[in-house]
Image (spheres, helix red, strand yellow):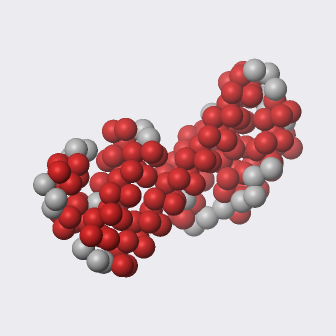
Amino acid sequence: MRYLPVYFETLNQQEAILALLSKEHYGHLLESTQSFSALRARAEMGAKSAASLQRIHEVFKFSLHKSLFSSVRTAEGSSARIKALVAMGKTNTALALANAEATKEDRLELLSAFARRVTERRGEIEPELLAYIGTLIRDVNFSDLGDKAIKIAADVLAFDADAAIGSSNPR
């Protein structure tokens, strides 16, 4: 399934590419590659196929997918930076980076990653941070986050199992 769109592209079967590229396909691709770059490339393939068939709405749809996959990749880079900073013992810098995120969802994602790494390193986190993460969990609509909600819940599970179970339930 991973290589089928490339095969269709080789055969110049644009209709088949568009029919194949679905949420399920993206899910399988992400699971097998663990890469947002692969998702971005696949969305670009969809946009090119739609353009060759002169389907403007589908060009827009796949261009939007590509843009979303690019932005998620950026957020993941921040999460990796948080993990690295905590591993180097630079927890204040990591906490400042996590708190600097503009959206509640991204802040929750990075603070959860931070708290998990600190818990794994030291065994506990400050009660104020735990309370703030709890507030963010109550404020965020997890049903809009897709796979990011699962990632957040997995991080929260490491330091607050009750909140993690609650955060995985959509509002």
What is the quadrant of residue 58 in the picture? Answer: bottom left
Regarding residue 124, the answer to whether it shows in the image is yes
Taking 33 as reference, is 100 left or right? Answer: right
Residue closest to the far front: 52
Q: Where is residue 49 drawn, in percent x and y?
A: 28, 65
Front position in the image: 45 or 35: 45
The front one of 17 and 96 is: 17
Residue 48 horizontal/vertical position (percent): 33, 63
Identify the residue at horizontal 19%, vertical 67% (top origin): 15
Residue 168 is at least partly visible in this image: no
Q: Is residue 142 left or right of residue 38?
A: right
Looking at this view, is 25 or 69 the one in front? 69
Q: Nearer the viewer, residue 48 or 121?
A: 48
Q: Which residue is located at x 49 percent, y 54 percent?
A: 69
Residue 6 rendering spot, x and y as whole percentages: 23, 49
Q: Which residue is drawn at the image coordinates 74% and 27% (left, top)?
A: 86
Q: Position of residue 22 (x, y in %)?
A: 31, 62
